[in-house]
Amino acid sequence: MIEIDNISKRFGEIQAIKKVSLQAANGKITGLLGPNGAGKSTALRVLYGLLKPDEGKVTVDGTDVFHQRPEAQRKMGVLPDAHGLYGRLTAREHISYFGRLHGVAENELGNQADELIRLLDMQSIADRRTEGFSQGERMKVCLARALIHRPGNVVLDEPTNGLDVMTTRKVRELMLELKARDITVLFSSHLMHEVARLCDEIIIIAAGTVVAEGTTAEIRDIAGEDNLEDAFVRLSEGESR
């Protein structure tokens, strides 16, 4: 479980997030929505441990991200908004490298890498250097290296952005598979149909604060709208006024 409790972060005169609280439970897919500049990326970077909040607390399975950061980070698999790869390494080498960084035992590393390669349908690219990979191929490598240590919590920042239809389907299938394994999945997206289809819980951030949370039906009811996109627009614009 991921728990964010009243975190705030200011950059000079800009209040990026203010008293943001949210929970992402085991075995559920939780969607994080917000317009550009709403504070989503700042909140996620605080969760990763890349930014220290001005106030508040973040825990992952009860481990404090700021007082026990290495332990907390071992409990997360993270797909950030930047997907840098080392072009001279193969996909398999990337996966193994990140597994070693996370302390995966050598006698387990090969089997875990093979499992992810099968799960993400990467057999044809597993032993190719990643230089020249398509966006979808790069995304698969990044997902595999985020999952190699079998984390109980997975955080994905716009995982289907820019992907073709087949790769998008594979990513969505992966998220449902993680849910079935009782893993916490927290992801951000701008695709309303994707969020409505996948998410058990939705959290909307606007102007640096949480303006609504609940199921798709509950969000629609809060906004008084018939579909999630209209509800999102109403709630986001209402906060910005």
Image: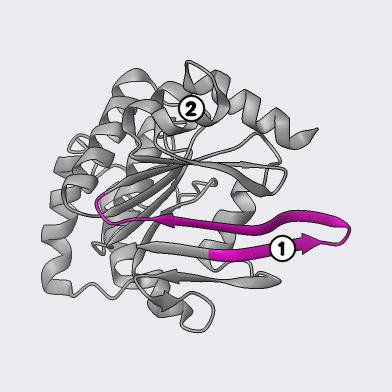
Residue type marked 2: Asp
**In the depicted structure, whether residue 160 falls above or below residue 117:** above
- Magenta residue span: 5-27
Of helix, strand and loop, which one carries label 2?
Answer: helix
Q: Dominant secondary structure of the magenta stretch? A: strand
Residue type marked 1: Lys
Q: Residue at x 33, y 64 (%)?
A: 97
Residue 105 appears left or right of 50: left
Query: Residue 109: where, in percent of width, then height?
Result: 17, 65
Q: Nearer the viewer, residue 109 or 196?
A: 196
Quarter that holds the C terminus? top right
Please state which of the two labelled residues, at mark 2 or mark 1, is closer to the viewer: 2
Q: Which residue is mark 1?
A: 9
Image quarter for residue 12? bottom right
Q: Are marks 2 and 1 in contact (CB under 8 Å)?
A: no
Give the crowd class for mark 2: few <14, some 14-19, many >=20 residues within 10 Å. Answer: some
Query: Residue 62: where, in percent of width, then height?
Result: 37, 75
Of helix, strand and loop, which one carries label 1?
Answer: strand
Residue 101 appears left or right of 105: right
Q: Residue at x 35, y 36 (%)?
A: 199
* The residue positioned farthest toward the right in the image shown: 13
Q: Is residue 8 magenta?
A: yes
Image quarter for residue 70? bottom left
**In the depicted structure, whether residue 97 falls above or below residue 69:** above
Q: Residue at x 80, y 60 (%)?
A: 11
